[in-house]
Image: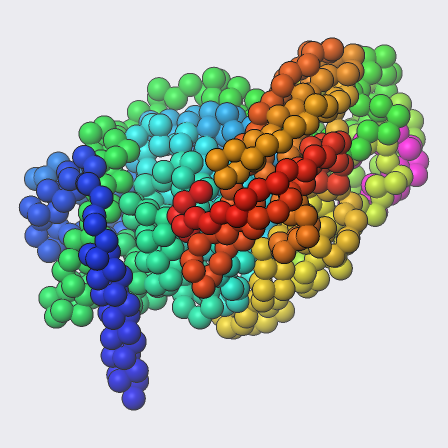
Amino acid sequence: MKKSLQTSRWAIALAAALAVQCAQAATPAAPLDAAQQRAAKLVSQMTIDEKISMVFGYFGTEFQGKQPPKGALPQSAGYLNGIERLGVTPQWLTDAGIGVASQPGKNTRERTSLPSGIATAATWNPRLAFEGAAMIGKEARLSGFNVMLGGSVNLAREPRNGRNFEYTGEDPLLAGIMAGEQIRGVQSNHVISTLKHYAYNDQETGRNHVNVKIKDPAGRMSDLLAFQIAIERGNPGSVMCSYNRVNGPYGCEHDHLLNKVLKGDWGFKGYVMSDWGATHSTIPAALAGLDQQSGYPFDKSPYFDGALKEAVQNGHVPESRLDDMVKRILWAMAAHGVLDNPVKVQDSQIDYTAHGRISQADAEEAIVLLKNQGNVLPLSPSLKRIAVIGGHANKGVLSGGGSAQVYPRGGMAVPNEGPESWPGPMVYLPGSPMKALAARNKARFSWHDGKDTAAAAKVAADADVVLVFATQWTSEAADVRTLSLPNKQDELIAAVAKANPRTVVVLQTGTPVTMPWVNEVAGVVEAWYPGTNGAEAIARVLTGEVDASGRLPQTFPLSENQLPRPTIDGIDLPKDTRFDVDYDIDGAAVGYKWFDLKGHKPLFAFGHGLSYTSFTYTNLKAQAVDGSIRVTFDTANSGARAGKAVPQVYVSKVGSGWEAPKRLGGWDKLALNAGERRGSTVTVDPRTLAVFDGATNRWKIAAGEYKVILASAADAPAQTVTVRLAAREFAAGAR
């Protein structure tokens, strides 16, 4: 019976693959581009063994007693053999999206770290996303790598997700644009970027077996839209499929997601690689659209090695499908310059000083000023005594854990904290925020580690201003159970604020956190994981050398009870238990859309962020243009100093019919001197005006009136106008 079921499974997958091929054959083929022609020519010259070598990848580090191939770089993420006689370079793979990461070991690779992905999203500045990614892409190339396993675009559907720090927020437009720019930046160095994790890998709990239940239209308007926009913007060479199951099948053998949506509707030309340990079969995976097995021996079997060769020779997988897999890989290598620009290790040429400045610029614009009662910030140069408490602020800044971990030059500032094994260690990057502040302010600084609450409160009582550095370490492979700060830091902050109400809390977190003490403190600053030179960035914002210009890319709830799932599904189940998570509860209403839909008032809204100056938004106009809406408005700096504004445009369908009352339609970021006024033009992405119709596989914009809202945050409208649109519909891969 088992053999019969497996044979049936192959037959179904084969029929699906052949149906896709027939459908493609029925449509006139577009002319092949030069990279596709080159890839086809190379494949025509390959033996079957050479083709198999292109689709079967190894982990680049010893794992479970198995050594990597000799060509792999030490403590790296992956390696695939090249074909020397055809001039096909090996593929050297490195994690991850915020820098050249290293597997743990004796000789960790020390490189520049960008701020976390969620921090870059908080800049709302696509240019910075590109420039930061171009920097780490350059370090990857100089380190000998030609494939980088980022950018990352999973939506923050689950705020307690341990990997949210790697991603780009809760809104598909913002997340897709920022991740797309990161992909463009990496690939500007002739290094392939890998968009991940496709799709719905929105929690780490049970990630290897959880079954996500979501209807396709809801997915197309949320998680999948973020991927679609990132692909359009960044043109990644590769997409990495995810661990989880989606409506039954695993993400890496999902015909609908891989063949129909990614390669069919969106016309993706590159290749699909598996996440490390996410391949579960040979024939079904190959027929369903997986092009490359990654990181063996993380998987239970070398599915795409000898087993795939046998399946091709026996006719279970058409040889044309194997050829397509290899062509896609070679297209990515040709289109992004990997074939013509071989890499070699040249790490002595890395300009760490210049790269640190790029990371710092990102961190400075990422820092969000959440509360500033009585203008406690920026810190006055006339202060006499400043107390700094907690968070190892006398030594370093925190970073997130797991495969994204970038090891800092000079070693860890705070050793021996966190788990001893992966996804640890817990890494603090060198650079003391307290020392950086002391270099900019003549006040006398006093330090307390915060471990003794009463003693910390006593230190706070004697200060003019208190800075409490609060931390929350998050990592791959584990979610946080609650949004509360760990290690009794809420109690510490409450005690310090009681002793001195002029307390500012500086958060270094990977997720939103709850703040039971928020009404008792004067200021709250979200610094995220600020990366290399993060201490300097924090000091420059706190002292006002630069404006506080970050805006939240994710809603901060008052409590977990406001979430679609107050408790994380599966959090208390034994390891490897299969279970479902129902994303149809919120559907496309992710983040601020859920809060709007349910009438919840958040702690801090999506898009929120204060400045050291003030802005006014006027002259809002909107008109229907080419089936979408063109919006114009003016932004003026009405304050006394220079600053950066982030005017946001939301759209709302009058009469609703949407998953939520409004959607982000676009934004601008402007640096304005005091008294300066400037105009902006924003063209709304048509998909943010449409509903995806699963029956016709098309986007549909309903005829009627649409309200355009100019705002400084999702809960802070400044002006509104109404515009009428005609009915319009367009293909799933169009806009």
**Which residue: 70% across, 23% down?**
619
**Secondary structure of the magenta portion, mostly?**
helix
Residue 380 is left or right of residue 53, and the answer is right
Quadrant of the frame with the N terminus: bottom left
Question: Residue 410: horizontal and vertical position, in percent?
Answer: 51, 27
* Quarter residue 677 falls in: top right
540 vs 516: above or below: above
Q: Does 93 appear above or below 397?
A: below
Q: How many marks?
A: 0
**Residue 503 within the magenta-colored segment of the rendering:** yes
Write the start and end of the magenta stretch as one range. Answer: 488-505
- The image quadrant of residue 139 is top left
Q: Residue at x 16, y 63 (%)?
A: 318
| Quadrant for the C terminus in the image | top left
Q: Residue at the spot x=25%, y=65% of the render?
A: 19
Of 49 and 35, nearer the camera is: 35
Q: Nearer the viewer, residue 521 or 17?
A: 17
Q: Is residue 417 magenta?
A: no
Residue drawn at x 72%, y 50% as measured from the top left: 596
> In front here: 304 or 393?
304
**Nearest the camera: 44 or 706?**
706
Q: Quarter-wise, where is residue 665 in the image?
A: top right
Can you give x and y, in whole percent of width and height, for residue 632 in the image?
62, 26
Image coordinates of residue 406 in percent, x first then y, are 48, 37
Q: Is residue 348 visible?
A: yes
Q: Position of residue 680 (x, y in %)?
A: 60, 22
- The answer to whether 631 is drawn above or below residue 517 in the figure is above
- Determine if residue 276 is in view: no
